[in-house]
Image: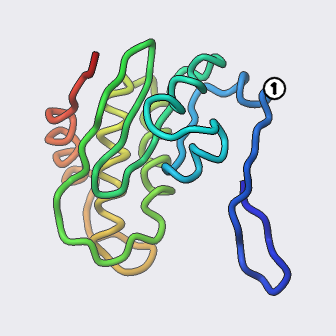
Amino acid sequence: MRRLEPGGSISLVPWRDLGLLRRLSVFKASTRELRLVAGEEGWVGLERLAGLGVDVVIETLGGEGSRIVHSGRRMVAPAHVGETVDTTGAGDAFIAGFMTEYASGEGVEWCAAVGSAAASAVVETVGPSIKMGRNELFERAERIRDGIEYLP
């Protein structure tokens, strides 16, 4: 999805490896990345990938939270409302938080809440460190989980 250009810049390019996509359990992308992989963004793109057999498909929306398709259900996980200082690494923090809990066998709602909490902790600081302990992160995740909406 990313190509290194002459001169060192990075560009996004369409990518579709259906064989690989069919083998994934979890797929997370920004809106722009989802469009490049699924050909569409939003629910259409998410459901297109879910139709290939991806168990959990996530579109991150920055300060608007995330859209998730799992087991034929649509859900919207909110973002934590706080001060944004630096968005670098937010998507990486989201998927790290999500996958840590997912690998432990937690439900998708909790995984999304932890991912969102981790992303919010990253955007509130400059650089790669966060100023929040595990307990505070999980308290934030509980509040986020309470705000998850299920759509028809």
In front of the other: 150 or 146: 150
The answer to whether residue 79 is above or below residue 77 is below
- Report x, y in % for residue 54: 60, 23
Q: Position of residue 137 (x, y in %)?
A: 25, 52
| 58 to the left or right of 65 | right
Q: Quadrant of the C terminus?
A: top left
Determine the residue located farthest toward the top in the rendered image: 72
Q: Is residue 137 above or below residue 12?
A: above
The amino acid sitting under disc 1 is: Gly
Q: Residue at the location (25% across, 50% down)? A: 79
Name the foreground residue: 127 vs 2: 2
**For the image shown, how many numbered marks are present on the structure?**
1
Q: Residue at x 45, y 73 (%)?
A: 128
Of residues 147 and 42, the one drawn nearer to the viewer in this rendering? 42
Residue 98: which quarter of the image? Answer: top left
Q: To which quarter of the image does residue 120 belong?
A: bottom left
Q: Is residue 32 visible?
A: yes
- Tell me if mark 1 has few (under 14), some (14-19) or many (20+) residues whose alpha carbon lies within 10 angstroms of its own: few
Left or right, 125 with respect to 94, comes to left
In the figure, 48 relative to 113: above or below?
above
* In-front residue for pair 69/107: 69
Left or right, 4 with respect to 53, comes to right
Residue farthest right in this picture:
6
Residue 103 visible in image: no
Image quadrant assignment for residue 2: bottom right
Residue tagged 1:
19
Above or below 24: residue 89: below
At x 44%, y 37%, the residue is 42
* Image-based side of 105 in relation to 18, left or right: left
**Residue 23, image x and y in percent?**
72, 23
